[in-house]
Amino acid sequence: MFLSTFEKQVDSKRRIVVPQDFRTAVSGPFEGVFCFPSIEADCLEGGGKALFDRYLGVIEEMPFGDPIRTALETSVLGGMAKLSFDTAGRITLPDHLCDMFGLSDWVTVVGMGERFQIWSREAFQAHRAAQRELARDGLAAMRVQQRAARLGAGA
C-alpha cells in the first residue's frame, strides 16, 4: 500500500526519489511505476502493476467503441508512462507531464492505498484543504444516516 505524504525535490533532469516504502509496495514485471495524468485531479497518478491491471479491467468491461471506454483508453493508456527506478530509487518524470501539471522544484507525493499522486507543492496545499472539508462534511452526513437507520430499525 502507498501511505503517507512526502515532499520531494525535482532535480534539473526532472528526477524525484520515490519514497522507499513506495518502492517496496510496487510489484510487477519491471522495477518502477506506471504514471499517467489523473482523471480525478490536476496531478499525476501512479502505482504498480496492480493499479494498471485495475484500470485495464475497468476499461475492458465497457464495449469496444463506447465513448467512455475511448476516453479512458486515451487518458489512462495513452497518457501512461512506465518509469523505471534508477540505482538511487529515482524516476524521471516526462517533460510533457511536468509541463501539464507545473511539476518543478518541489512536488508532493501522496499515498492513496493502491495508488499515489504527484502534485505541485502549491496545488496540493489547496487540494488538501478542500479534501479535508469534503471528508469532514461527508463523514458527518454518513453519521447522520447511520443514526437515522438505527432509530428506524428500533421502531
Image (cartoon, rainbow, N blue to C red):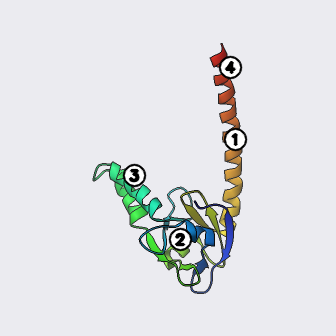
Q: Are marks 1 and 3 in contact (CB under 8 Å)?
A: no
| Residue in view at x 51 percent, y 61 percent | 38
Secondary structure beneath dot 4 equals: helix
**How far across and how far down the image is residue 107, in percent?**
65, 72
| Residue in view at x 60 percent, y 78 percent | 16
Judge from the rendering whether residue 52 lies leftward or rightward of residue 127; answer left or right: left
Q: Is residue 77 above or below residue 11?
A: above
Secondary structure beneath dot 2 equals: helix
**How far across and how far down the image is residue 145, in percent?**
65, 29
Badge 3: residue crowd in 10 Å (few <14, some 14–19, many ≥20): few
Q: In the rendered structure, which amino acid carries the disc numbered 1?
A: Asp
**Residue placed under numbered mark 3 in the picture:** 58
| Residue in view at x 70 percent, y 41 percent | 137
Of the numbered discs 1 and 2, the one sitting upstream in the chain is: 2
Find residue 86 and name its label. Answer: none
**Residue placed under numbered mark 2 in the picture:** 100
Q: Are marks 4 and 3 in contact (CB under 8 Å)?
A: no
Judge from the rendering whether residue 83 lies leftward or rightward of residue 77; answer left or right: right
Mark 1 vs mark 2: give the one in front. Answer: 1
**Residue placed under numbered mark 1 in the picture:** 137
- The alpha-carbon separation of the residues under discs 1 and 4 comes to 21 Å
Q: In the rendered structure, which amino acid carries the disc numbered 3?
A: Val
Q: In the rendered structure, which amino acid carries the disc numbered 4?
A: Leu
Judge from the rendering whether residue 59 lies leftward or rightward of residue 43; answer left or right: left
Foreground residue, 3 or 82?
3
Foreground residue, 47 or 30?
30
**Residue placed under numbered mark 4 in the picture:** 151
Mark 4 vs mark 2: give the one in front. Answer: 4
